[in-house]
Image (cartoon, rainbow, N blue to C red):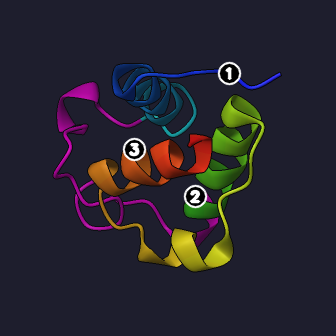
């Protein structure tokens, strides 16, 4: 059963994950925010984030696509592509 999510749904879930699980200040979570520089995630955090997004979408982001992700907007775009 495929779920349909809007861009806003994806952004809301991503924001919730970053605030609740990674204790990121919500004010820092903007489309242009860099996950590693602005939000100070490390590679382990990035893997945890990918796993949480996989649980949300029931789909796995490929390692190739995941390596390209740098910003919040990149994450949302990757999840959108995954759900197409």
Camera-side residue of 9 and 24: 9
> Is-magenta flag for residue 26?
yes
Q: Which of pointers 3 and 1 lies earlier in the amino acid sequence?
A: 1
Query: Few, some or many C-alpha atoms within 10 Å of disc 2 (few <14, some 14-19, many ≥20)?
Result: some
Numbered badge on residue 76: 3
Q: Main secondary structure of the magenta part?
A: loop
* Snapshot quadrant of residue 59: top right
Which residue occupies 34% across, 67% down? 70
State the extent of the magenta-drawn residues as a range: 24-45
> Is-magenta flag for residue 14?
no
User: Does residue 45 lie above or below 9 as drawn?
Assistant: below
Horizontally, residue 77 falls left or right of residue 22, namely left
Q: Secondary structure at mark 2?
A: helix
Q: CA distance from mark 1 to mark 2?
A: 26 Å
Numbered badge on residue 3: 1
Camera-side residue of 41 and 59: 59
| Residue receiving disc 2 | 45
Q: CA distance from mark 2 to mark 3?
A: 17 Å
User: Residue 67 location in percent, x, y?
Assistant: 51, 77
User: Residue 1 location in percent, x, y?
Assistant: 83, 21
């Amino acid at each position: 059963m495929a779920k349909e999510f809007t861009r806003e749904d994806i952004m809301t879930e991503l924001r919730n994950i970053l605030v609740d699980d990674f204790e990121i200040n919500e004010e820092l979570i903007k489309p242009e925010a860099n996950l590693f520089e602005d939000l100070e995630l490390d590679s382990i955090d990035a893997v945890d984030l990918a796993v949480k997004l996989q649980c949300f979408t029931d789909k796995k982001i490929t390692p190739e696509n995941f390596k390209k992700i740098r910003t919040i907007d990149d994450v949302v775009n990757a999840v959108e592509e995954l759900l197409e």
